[in-house]
């Protein structure tokens, strides 16, 4: 009996010794931590870029969504009415601008034509006046000669040196030439008057042409107004598009912050969306355990909520600063009072499989050390 008890004690010592050896060997070859959690980079807070009354909420917490699916909607009737109003105003302003452009084109063409005609008439009248003026001077020279001949022929007629018929012929020619000169002088005066009228008409055309600049300014002003309203219209169209929230990726609703018929402000959270496939493990590892832990090392993960399943992964990154570096209340060691604390560093672990995992789950991990 005493011998059996001794054997049992020896067996227990061997078992516990072996278990202790396995445990110590496991701890020596693996960096172990239970400060590990399932994390996601694809947790997104969805909100509206406009304020208003929420008239549609299509999903509840835990439901799956597809990329591009409408998740919520704000009442956009006021924006639509504003869009229709400014669209009608733009159309009316464009018509006014087109009407002024047609008017400007018509007036410009008319003034250009009138200016061209007036300049041609001025040139024509000047040439005509020059020709009449020269003709009058030539005829006056002839008239002067005929007047001298008439006096001479009259004396010859009194002495009966010529016939009366010859004298009357000279007198008739003189009178006819005098009448012609009078007619030419009237023509010259009339042409001069016409020239003056045409010059006045040309000046008026030039003045009217200057007035077309005012029409051009009005057209430019309307163009700026149209551009401003079009910018405003685009802004309203953007706001109408902001009245709907679309799923940015395939995922699940992690949290629903509000219910339908709620009046909310810009940026107020509506949904929290998570991508269940974009998961990783975030580990807080003691600095004492960092020896041999490198990027690419194999990792074994046990999830508290999934006791019978192991997950595999690899060390993706090791953050270069400790978790306490960015603490809101940093440690003050300036006074010389210092208590050494075990610092923890954040290790990011990629997963080979994410099936069954949920963001926020706790985990135990073992990182294979590199020798």
Image: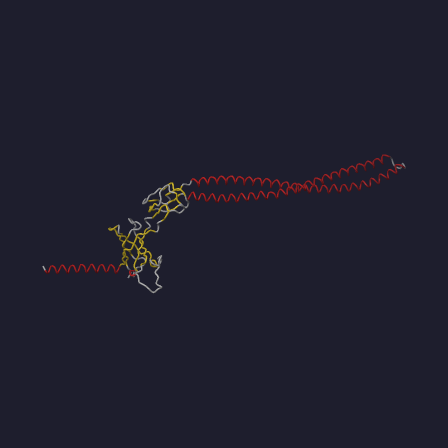
Query: What's the coloring here?
Result: secondary structure
Q: Nearer the viewer, residue 136 or 53?
A: 53
The picture quadrant where one finds residue 8 is bottom left
In the rendered view, does 309 fall on the left or right side of 114? Answer: left
In the rendered view, does 323 fall on the left or right side of 159? Answer: left
State whether residue 63 is above or below residue 289. above
The picture quadrant where one finds residue 285 is bottom left
Q: Nearer the viewer, residue 247 or 166?
A: 247
Please state the horizontal and vertical placement of residue 287, each as a whole percent of the image: 30, 60
Tally of marks: 0
Please state the horizontal and vertical placement of residue 30, each as a whole percent of the image: 27, 59
Please state the horizontal and vertical placement of residue 350, each as a whole percent of the image: 31, 54
Q: Nearer the viewer, residue 142 or 9?
A: 9
Residue placed furthest toward the right: 159
Name the quadrant of the N terminus.
Answer: bottom left
In the rendered view, does 157 fall on the left or right side of 104? Answer: right
Residue placed furthest toward the left: 1
In the rendered view, does 297 fall on the left or right side of 177? Answer: left
Residue placed furthest toward the top: 165
Please state the horizontal and vertical placement of residue 99, each as a whole percent of the image: 55, 39
Name the quadrant of the C terminus.
Answer: bottom left
């Amino acid at each position: 009996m005493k011998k059996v008890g001794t054997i049992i004690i020896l067996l227990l010592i061997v078992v516990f010794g072996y278990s202790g050896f396995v445990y110590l060997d496991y701890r020596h070859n693996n960096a172990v931590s239970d400060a590990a959690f399932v994390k996601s980079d694809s947790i997104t807070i969805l909100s509206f870029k406009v304020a208003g009354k929420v008239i549609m909420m299509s999903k509840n917490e835990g439901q799956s969504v597809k990329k591009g699916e409408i998740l919520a909607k704000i009442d956009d009737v006021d924006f639509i009415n504003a869009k229709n109003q400014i669209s009608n105003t733009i159309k009316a302003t464009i018509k006014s601008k087109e009407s002024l452009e047609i008017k400007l084109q018509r007036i410009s063409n008319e003034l250009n034509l009138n200016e061209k005609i007036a300049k041609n008439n001025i040139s024509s009248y000047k040439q005509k006046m020059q020709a009449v003026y020269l003709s009058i001077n030539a005829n006056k020279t002839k008239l002067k000669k005929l007047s001298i001949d008439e006096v001479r022929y009259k004396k010859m007629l009194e002495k009966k040196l010529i016939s009366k018929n010859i004298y009357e012929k000279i007198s008739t020619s003189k009178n006819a030439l005098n009448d012609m000169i009078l007619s030419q002088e009237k023509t010259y005066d009339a042409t001069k008057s016409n020239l003056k009228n045409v010059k006045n008409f040309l000046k008026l055309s030039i003045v009217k042409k200057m007035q077309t600049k005012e029409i051009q300014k009005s057209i430019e002003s309307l163009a700026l107004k149209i551009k401003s309203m079009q910018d405003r219209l685009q802004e309203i169209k953007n706001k109408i598009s902001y009245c709907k929230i679309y799923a940015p990726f395939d995922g699940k609703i992690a949290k629903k912050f509000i219910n339908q018929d709620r009046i909310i402000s810009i940026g107020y959270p509506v949904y929290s969306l998570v991508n269940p496939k974009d998961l990783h493990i975030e580990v807080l590892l003691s600095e004492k355990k960092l020896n041999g832990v490198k990027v690419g090392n194999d990792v074994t993960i046990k999830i508290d909520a999934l006791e019978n399943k192991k997950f595999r992964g690899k060390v993706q990154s090791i953050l270069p600063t400790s978790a306490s570096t960015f603490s809101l209340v940093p440690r003050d060691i300036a006074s010389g009072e210092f208590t050494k604390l075990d610092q923890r560093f954040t290790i990011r672990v990629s997963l080979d499989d994410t099936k069954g995992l949920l963001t926020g789950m706790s985990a135990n991990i073992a990182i294979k050390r590199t020798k």
